[in-house]
């Protein structure tokens, strides 16, 4: 074998084979899939934690309203926590929830939080005695409440915190 033959064989073997390139592409795809799955899990846990914190925040505001509010009862609807027209001094109260610019958004009974708004939206249902039907407008004595939030980790199930005495009926609208 001459020096000329060795030199031409070395030059002919430069570059990667198609098998080597396929292996690299498969390894990159596997790493990307693992990263995406991990990211989705972290995101759903963060959203679930945010939704639960929002519900716990409203629970504290509702309990403060029952202790310090104008009626010595739990609020009928979430608007009672922000209605400055009905109670002019409400903005200075510890239970006050601003209508805009707040991380806490409340929905009346019958409106469920969803995956698109569930990190900062909870459903509020006043419970107690009704004059007729189960509309919050007919709620005469409010003895408790149900606060529900969207559970991102459990296929969109709705979880609930009970406040006060919820043994009676709860508002459905």
Image: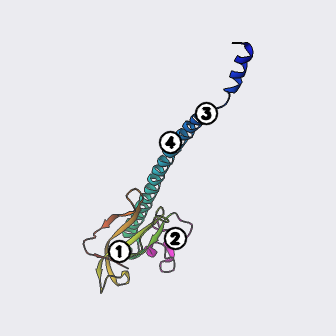
Name the main secondary structure of what is drawn in magenta: loop
Residue at mark 3 to residue at mark 1: CA–CA distance: 70 Å
Pinpoint residue 152: horizontal percent, then vertical percent.
Answer: 42, 58
Residue at mark 2 to residue at mark 3: CA–CA distance: 72 Å
- Residue at x 47% of width, y 61% of height: 119
Q: Which residue is mark 1?
A: 126
Q: Earlier in the sequence, mark 4 or mark 2?
A: 4
Q: Which residue is mark 4?
A: 30
Q: Is residue 65 left or right of residue 25?
A: left
- Mark 3 or 4: in front is 3
Q: Nearer the viewer, residue 90 or 163?
A: 163
Dot 1 lies on which element? Answer: strand
Residue at mark 3 to residue at mark 4: CA–CA distance: 20 Å
Pinpoint residue 107: horizontal percent, then vertical percent.
Answer: 44, 72
Q: Earlier in the sequence, mark 1 or mark 2?
A: 2
Q: Earlier in the sequence, mark 3 or mark 1?
A: 3
Residue at mark 1 to residue at mark 4: CA–CA distance: 50 Å
What span is in magenta? 78-102
Residue at mark 1 to residue at mark 2: CA–CA distance: 21 Å
Q: Which residue is mark 2?
A: 91
> Is residue 31 something that shows in the picture?
yes
Dot 2 lies on which element? Answer: helix
């Amino acid at each position: 074998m001459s020096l000329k033959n060795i030199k031409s064989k070395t030059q002919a073997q430069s570059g990667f084979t198609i098998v080597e390139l396929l292996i690299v592409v498969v390894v990159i795809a596997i790493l990307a899939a693992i990263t995406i799955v991990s990211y989705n899990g972290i995101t759903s846990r963060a959203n679930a934690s945010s939704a639960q914190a929002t519900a716990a925040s409203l629970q504290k505001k509702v309990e403060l309203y029952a202790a310090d509010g104008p009626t010595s009862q739990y609020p009928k609807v979430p608007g009672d926590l922000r209605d400055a027209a009905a109670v002019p001094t409400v903005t200075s109260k510890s239970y006050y929830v601003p209508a805009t610019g707040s991380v806490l958004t409340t929905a009346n009974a019958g409106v469920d939080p969803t995956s698109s708004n569930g990190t900062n939206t909870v459903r509020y249902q006043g419970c107690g005695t009704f004059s007729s039907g189960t509309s919050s407008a007919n709620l005469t004595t409010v003895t408790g409440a149900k606060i529900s939030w969207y559970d991102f980790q459990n296929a969109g199930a709705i979880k609930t915190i009970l406040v006060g005495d919820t043994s009676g009926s709860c508002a459905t609208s």
